[in-house]
Amino acid sequence: MSKVFGIGLSRTGTSSLNEALELLGYRSIHFPIIMENTSPQAKLKYRLNKWGKELGKKQAFFTEFTSGTNNNLAFKKPDESKFDAMTDLSVARFYKELDTAFSGSKFIFTIRDQDDWAQSCARFFAKGNHQFFKWQQVNIDMYGSNSFNEDLFRHAYQHHVRDVKTHFSQRPQDLLIINISAGEGWEKLCPFLGKSLLDFPFPKTNVASS
């Protein structure tokens, strides 16, 4: 079975895609930890935050644990025996490295109307989800910010679309572009993966309240 990677940005239906892949028989991981922080200071701040959380401390010692460091993310190749598929922002961040590490894989690019996407991101990031420690540098790398900034996020969305389409321009058979938020589902996903169509509704998970 070829590996499958969901390379859409946050709030583009990545949770729904992950569940759909599981229903199709894939061992799929949502937001896999396939990266390492390179700065000793960032690693120390992260460990202190984790220690504080274990002690029941509600507020992290360092809200921005990568701030003031020269931290970068290094790709950490996952053990291929432990998964069939992966989805979400960490996969989008390292999709080129994954493409090199797992040749012959399939890539699913979840997209969304950009205005709807920006509104969804504004709501999602307002909840403080971006403070989860392992997310911070990924957000900075992908969006240019660890908190919602509409101009930066829209620029990042457009850049990622161009980047993905350019990367697969000579291999269109390896890329599926799907808009789950607009109602696309099994009819596109199953043929792309060589699977029979399922006769029940496509998953809709982690949908933000209006």
Image: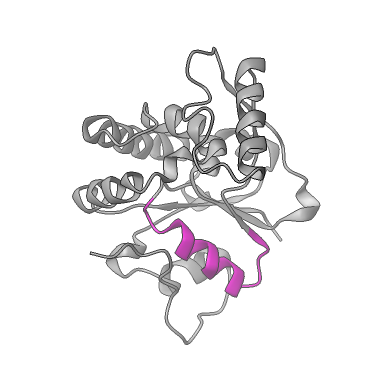
Q: State which region is magenta.
A: 11-28
Question: Which quarter of the figure is the N terminus placed in?
Answer: bottom right
User: Splitting the image into 4 quarters, where does residue 13 fall?
Assistant: bottom left
Is residue 122 covered in magenta?
no
For the residue pair 207 and 13, the one nearer the viewer reads as 207
132 sits to left or right of 128: right
Q: Residue at x 49, y 13 (%)?
A: 68
Question: Which quarter of the figure is the C terminus placed in?
Answer: bottom left
Q: Residue at x 41, y 63 (%)?
A: 206
84 sits to left or right of 63: right
Residue 130 image offset from top left, x and y in percent: 43, 40
Q: Residue at x 43, y 76 (%)?
A: 202
Residue 92 image offset from top left, x and y in percent: 49, 41
For the residue pair 166 and 63, the one nearer the viewer reads as 63
41 sits to left or right of 174: right
Q: Vertically, is 162 above or below 187?
A: above
Q: How many marks?
A: 0
126 sits to left or right of 69: left
> Residue furthest toward the bottom?
199
Q: Vertically, is 43 above or below 84?
A: above
> Residue furthest toward the right?
81
